[in-house]
Amino acid sequence: MTKPFDVVGVGLNATDTMLLVPHFPAYGGKVPFTREIISPGGQVASAMVTCSRLGLRAKYIGTVGDDERGEIQMRSLVSSGVDLTHVQRRANCPNQSAYIVIDQSTGERTVFWNRPDCLAISPDQIDPDQITCARLLHIDGHDTRAVEHAARIARQHGIPITVDVDTIYAGFDRVLPLVDYLIASSEFPGRWTRIDDPRKALEALQREYGMRVAAMTLGSHGALALADGKFHYSPGYVVHCVDTTGAGDVFHGAFCYAVLDRMSLSAALDFSNALAALNCTAIGARGGISGADAARDLMERGQRHVNAEYAI
């Protein structure tokens, strides 16, 4: 039976205030900013926007504040075609926000964020039908008990699970055994396992928790993944980078698409790297989200950032 959605995401959204500066100042220094931009973002929400842009039927489950930042987030999600039936608007609660300083000389960003406790989502607010309506579940780690509950429902119904995690969350050891595709930040595997070597850290994660793919994103250097006892390194693509905000979120949305499209792991990593790189060519977490054709064109014609450390 055909399901109403291709992918459902449970996790964070945020509304960003972006400050563009000619260069990041030294500690204790001072520098004028050239532009101030308010832009919607957030890990899972932006991944679902990416999925929708790629033609998938995407559903987002999360909480949104009732302030102006929450309205900005909702308008963005509505205009992107993401289903918001089970988004909860929290009264008298500000939306998650971030202040992002973008170094215009490099495109790199520094993030300061806050998420009020009134935005927390609990397991009893997620019914099985909200998860089983989709072919794939994508989660992050912040509301750990809620995403664990969603992942258990998905696992019970044979629905593959992808996860985006960039920091240590208490209780996340209960989530990891449920995951099929772990795509972590470059810092997470080492922090979690206390193993500095990225390959050995990924091996340890896969050995302990049994996920099908254990992977990490590497910024401009691409991504490294372990599956079936073999490492796959996909170098990043060379683009004119103006803002790296949201690149990881777009990578995850593209990877969800690649899983559902039954791409090989190597092709999935290349495709996800390409779409993430294209997002870096515009300002904002969702400023440069492109379609599949643009990603494939970059894959065919683009140059790569090959890092010999990971290519070995």
Image (cartoon, rainbow, N blue to C red):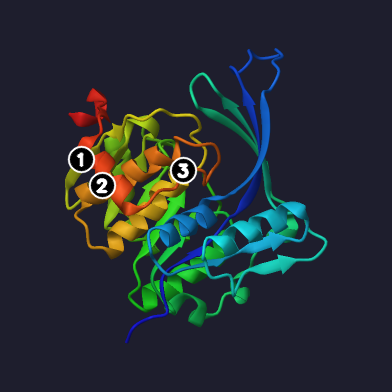
Name the residue nearer the viewer: 63 or 229: 63
Report x, y in % for residue 311. Answer: 20, 30
Q: Secondary structure at mark 3?
A: loop
Give the residue displayed 25% in from the left and 38% down from the top: 234
For residue 189, say whether it is visible: no
Which comes sooner in the sequence, label 1 or label 3? 3
Q: Quadrant of residue 270?
A: top left
Residue corresponding to mark 2? 296
Q: CA distance from mark 2 to mark 3?
A: 15 Å
Which comes sooner in the sequence, label 2 or label 3? 3
Q: CA distance from mark 1 to mark 3?
A: 19 Å
Q: Quadrant of residue 99?
A: top right
Q: Are marks 2 and 1 in contact (CB under 8 Å)?
A: yes
Name the residue nearer the viewer: 301 or 107: 301
Residue corresponding to mark 3? 288
Q: Secondary structure at mark 1?
A: helix
Name the residue nearer the viewer: 27 or 71: 71
Q: Are marks 2 and 3 in contact (CB under 8 Å)?
A: no
For residue 229, say whether it is visible: yes
Q: Judge from the rendering whether residue 18 lies leftward or rightward of residue 117; answer left or right.
A: left
Residue corresponding to mark 1? 300
Q: Secondary structure at mark 2?
A: helix
Residue that extends furthest to the right in the rendered view of this protein: 92
Residue type pointed to by label 1: Glu
Residue type pointed to by label 3: Gly
